[in-house]
């Protein structure tokens, strides 16, 4: 507007709205959000007919092919199950409360999670008991789980709901493998998705107090997510990092006070169960598939035919070594991720440190099943929508603009390869596809449970995670030469 209040006629002067629109990619070039939508849509179009035909001819239900059997000893069939769904993890909590202890090492119901991690689930178990309806408590719990898991899809569609919601709710919601597995098992990992999204938005916009709050919430629900404090290193906020660790540890320990038995005994039993957690599933067990770093490395070596080259006994010895040294492997990967973030190249895309930290958090426990992939719904949502205000409030809402569409520094080929890898990798982690294992891979098709067949894509979930971790580390640190290494170290010291 000119001083007289009439519209400005000078075509060289852009309004604020026009300036924002100029930031958008040209119509002739697809955004990385567009590419992710295309890849994910194709995968879903392949997945559901394939699994329907395969499961039909083999006599399996959908969730048996994708997740766990109903008769897996975690729930009473016909009592704690509904149709072909077991909700085993929720049922196990009910059994543990009935036994009077959550952490007693001699009980099969012992859990490696701290007290406050189970508090939300316990509320719904108690609702079921107070109303004399186990089903009511279970259904309310599943409703809250579903809402939490769908939060990234709803957020990514916000602002252009009529256009984006159908695809977004499908691709990173109702048709995604994490949603189906989390709801099938009734696993509390789904409760982490909503606060993790809050963390990702706060991390992207540099709101450190909210980052601290959401990291504390995530770590209380799943202790290994304390590794999210590494994201403070992106901004060199060491004070926030230390404060978040201190608050998380203190709150976790304080939660044991409100549970039966004595405070020291609860903590001692919990620590005992944690040390035994990696033994809950051996590295030789194929299904349910373990995403832990040791099992992932063993899978890669199996795919490379190590068994046929060095013999069965050598493979067995390697499995024992990997299981015994899983913690060492995690520490090594953790050191690499930390170093990459400390040496982060200027203007590198912040989505890569987030993916790296999430990958190491998922692979850190000795046993991590496929429902942990629910955490990757959050970076998938960031691919579809950029949380930064200048991009998320663009007036031209007909475009998909995500975090990958922000400009990057560094080589164009490397950045393009990394973005394609992230788009395809996240699409595969979200895809609910089950393909029988070909015999030439040298992996047994039939799992220890009679009649259950493992899917190829589930076997590859661990290697895909490791590949995303490696690419994210490289894209975070960039090319480090002697001169740039010294400059970055000095810059890091100066900023601290």
Image: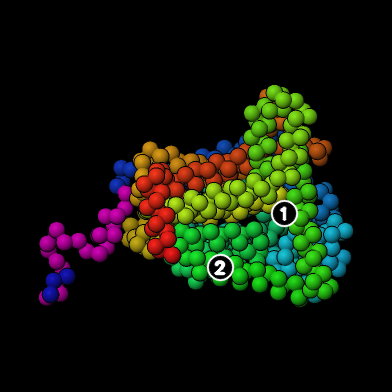
Q: Quadrant of the C terminus?
A: bottom left
Circle 2 or circle 1, nearest the eye? 2
Horizontal placement of 289 versus 383: left or right? right
Horizontal placement of 15 versus 344: left or right? left
The residue at the point 31 percent across, 46 percent down is 27
Q: 145 or 61: nearer the eye?
A: 145
Element assignment for label 2: helix
**Other residues around mark 2 within 10 Å, as few (<14) / some (14–19) / many (≥20):** few
In this view, 286 is above or below 487: above
Residue 302 magenta-drawn? Answer: no
The residue at the point 64 percent across, 58 percent down is 224
How many numbered discs? 2
Q: Which residue is mark 1?
A: 185
Return the x and y of residue 444 as percentages of the image width and height: 74, 31
The region drawn magenta spans: 4-25
In this view, 351 is above or below 203: above
Residue 237 in view, yes or no: yes
The residue at the point 55 percent across, 41 percent down is 467
Horizontal placement of 496 versus 181: left or right? left
Return the x and y of residue 383 as percentages of the image width and height: 46, 51
Q: Which residue is mark 2?
A: 242
Horizontal placement of 70 versus 372: left or right? right
Element assignment for label 1: helix
Return the x and y of residue 31 as percentages of the image width and height: 38, 46
């Amino acid at each position: 507007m000119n001083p007289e209040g009439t519209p400005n006629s000078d075509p060289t002067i852009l309004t604020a709205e026009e300036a924002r629109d100029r930031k958008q990619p040209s119509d002739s070039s697809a955004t990385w959000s567009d590419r992710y939508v295309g890849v994910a849509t194709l995968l879903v179009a392949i997945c559901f007919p394939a699994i329907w035909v395969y499961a039909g001819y083999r006599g399996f239900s959908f969730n048996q092919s994708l997740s766990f059997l109903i008769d897996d000893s975690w729930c009473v069939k016909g009592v704690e199950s509904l149709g072909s769904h077991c909700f085993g993890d929720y049922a196990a909590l009910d059994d543990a409360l009935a036994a009077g202890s959550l952490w007693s090492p001699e009980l099969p119901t012992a859990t490696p999670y701290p007290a406050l991690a189970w508090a939300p689930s316990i509320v719904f178990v108690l609702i079921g008991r107070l109303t004399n309806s186990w089903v009511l408590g279970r259904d309310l719990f599943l409703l809250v789980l579903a809402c939490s898991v769908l939060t990234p899809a709803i957020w990514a569609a916000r602002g252009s709901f009529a256009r984006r919601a159908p695809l977004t709710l499908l691709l990173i919601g109702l048709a995604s493998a994490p949603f189906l597995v989390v709801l099938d098992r009734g696993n509390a990992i789904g409760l982490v998705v909503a606060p993790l999204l809050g963390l990702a938005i706060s991390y992207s916009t540099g709101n450190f107090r909210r980052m601290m709050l959401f990291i504390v919430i995530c770590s209380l629900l799943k202790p290994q997510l304390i590794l999210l404090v590494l994201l403070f290193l992106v901004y060199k906020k060491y004070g926030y990092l230390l404060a978040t660790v201190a608050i998380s540890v203190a709150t976790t320990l304080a939660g044991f006070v409100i549970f039966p038995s004595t405070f020291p005994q609860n903590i001692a039993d919990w620590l005992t169960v944690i040390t035994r957690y990696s033994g809950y599933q051996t590295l030789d067990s194929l299904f349910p598939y373990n995403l832990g770093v040791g099992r992932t490395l063993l899978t890669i070596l199996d795919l490379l035919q190590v068994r046929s080259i060095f013999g069965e006994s050598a493979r067995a010895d390697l499995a024992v070594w990997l299981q015994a040294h899983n913690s060492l492997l995690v520490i090594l990967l953790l050191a690499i991720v930390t170093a990459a973030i400390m040496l982060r190249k200027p203007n590198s895309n912040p989505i890569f440190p987030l993916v790296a930290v999430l990958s190491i958090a998922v692979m850190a426990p000795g046993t991590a099943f496929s429902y942990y992939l629910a955490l990757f719904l959050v970076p998938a949502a960031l691919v579809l929508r950029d949380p930064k205000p200048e991009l998320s409030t663009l007036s031209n809402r007909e475009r998909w603009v995500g975090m990958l569409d922000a400009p990057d520094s560094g080589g164009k080929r490397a950045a393009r390869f990394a973005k394609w890898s992230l788009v395809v990798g996240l699409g595969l982690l979200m895809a609910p596809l089950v393909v029988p294992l070909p015999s030439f891979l040298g992996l047994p098709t039939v799992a220890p449970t009679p009649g259950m067949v493992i899917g190829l894509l589930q076997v590859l979930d661990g290697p895909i995670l490791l590949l995303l971790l490696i690419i994210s580390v490289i894209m975070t640190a960039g090319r480090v030469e002697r001169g740039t290494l010294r400059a970055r170290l000095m810059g890091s010291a100066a900023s601290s």
